[in-house]
Amino acid sequence: MPDNASRAIASALLPWYDRNARDLPWRARPGANAPDPYRVWLSEVMLQQTQVASVIPYFDKFTARWPNVEALAAAEDADLMAAWAGLGYYARARNLLACAREVARRGGFPDTESGLRELPGVGGYTAAAIAAIAFGRRAVVVDANVERVVTRLFAAAAPLPGAKAAIYAHTDSITPDTRAGDFAQAMMDLGSGICTARSPRCLLCPLRAHCAGFAGGAPERFPVKAVKAPKPQRFGTMFWLERGGAVLLVRRPARGLLGGMRALPTGPWADSPPGLADAPAVAAWETLEAGVSHGFTHFNLDVALAAATLSSHAGAAVAGEWWPVADLESAGLPTVFAKAARQFRRTLCAV
């Protein structure tokens, strides 16, 4: 529990938050009634590994189309995956639907951390955030912004990710017994707007008097991060097979990277360029000069692009679905495939 010195941090931070809280579509204003747990949960899932500015339009579209957890639970898998396209980390979308269906089956969200942890795809951070923000429970909420603020407050010199347990303990020591949800959001806002990764605006910080990093003269050196190993490089080929103004799309396997998403046909992503061995049909394939590069969490990908055209009556036995090229944006392609589609269209239209 917080001691007197740590209580001073909450006492300084919460009035600042009351005046400066960001206006976000999933939030309740400080001092207002608790927000809808559905909106809190949906936003927290979307915000994992994704910036607020990118999430807001997706959140608005989702809540307009599926305004509550029961509506989302009734969504078709393909519709949900298409609506998620572009947000990345697509396992989140599959877990989102599984969680919505479980919550609808239960008749609502559990209101405790332990109960929330039982839901599909809800980990420790998300459970703590929902418990604190939606239900007013005292919970220790540590995202990347909070991590940065806390390491500076305590001048925590141990490198990440090994220091995460110590950062959690530090955050626990300053989390108040009341208004824990507002405190968590205040820490997030402080990290986002004041205690930024580069050039922190210390003179505007309500916690400056309590910050060991500021007192030491170099708050920007925290958090200390371990040197990352270089990402592996992989290679692949994507195929653009056109017929009568439509392009062939396939559904990726339900399990694995980008599982369940519509995509352009592609062979395996391997340690060396695979060439045309996995083309979806026998055709006069032409490899384009320009390829596509994309960074995933655990590897970088370089993709060659190969295009071919079938006559209007050919290709009946080709597995997949023929999608109108003029309406390709509605297919919900994941980012790497959307990049490739744009490159195909630019190149082929220029020929």
Image (cartoon, rainbow, N blue to C red):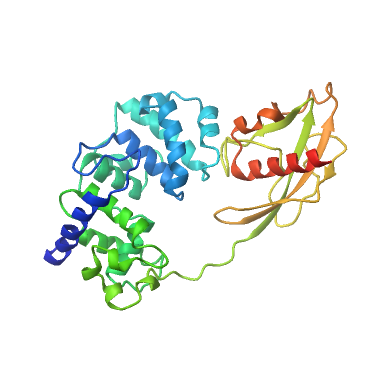
Q: Quadrant of the C terminus?
A: top right
Quarter of the rendering containing residue 14: bottom left
Q: Where does residue 61 sit, x and y in percent of width and height?
A: 45, 32
In this picture, residue 62 sits left or right of residue 246: left
Q: Nearer the viewer, residue 199 or 343?
A: 199
Q: Is residue 119 visible?
A: no
In this picture, residue 348 sits left or right of residue 199: right
Quarter of the rendering containing residue 199: bottom left
In this picture, residue 314 sits left or right of residue 264: right
Give the residue displayed 29% in from the left and 52% down from the top: 141
Q: Quadrant of the N terminus?
A: bottom left
Q: Where does residue 213 sit, x and y in percent of width and height?
A: 30, 73
In the image, farthest residue toward the bottom: 216
In this picture, residue 43 sits left or right of residue 269: left
Give the residue displayed 85% in from the left and 26% down from the top: 311
Q: Where does residue 50 sit, x and y in percent of width and height?
A: 46, 49
Position above or below: 221 against 41: below
Q: Where does residue 253 sit, x and y in percent of width and height?
A: 61, 36
Quarter of the rendering containing residue 308: top right
Position above or below: 248 against 56: above
Q: Nearer the viewer, residue 135 or 62?
A: 62
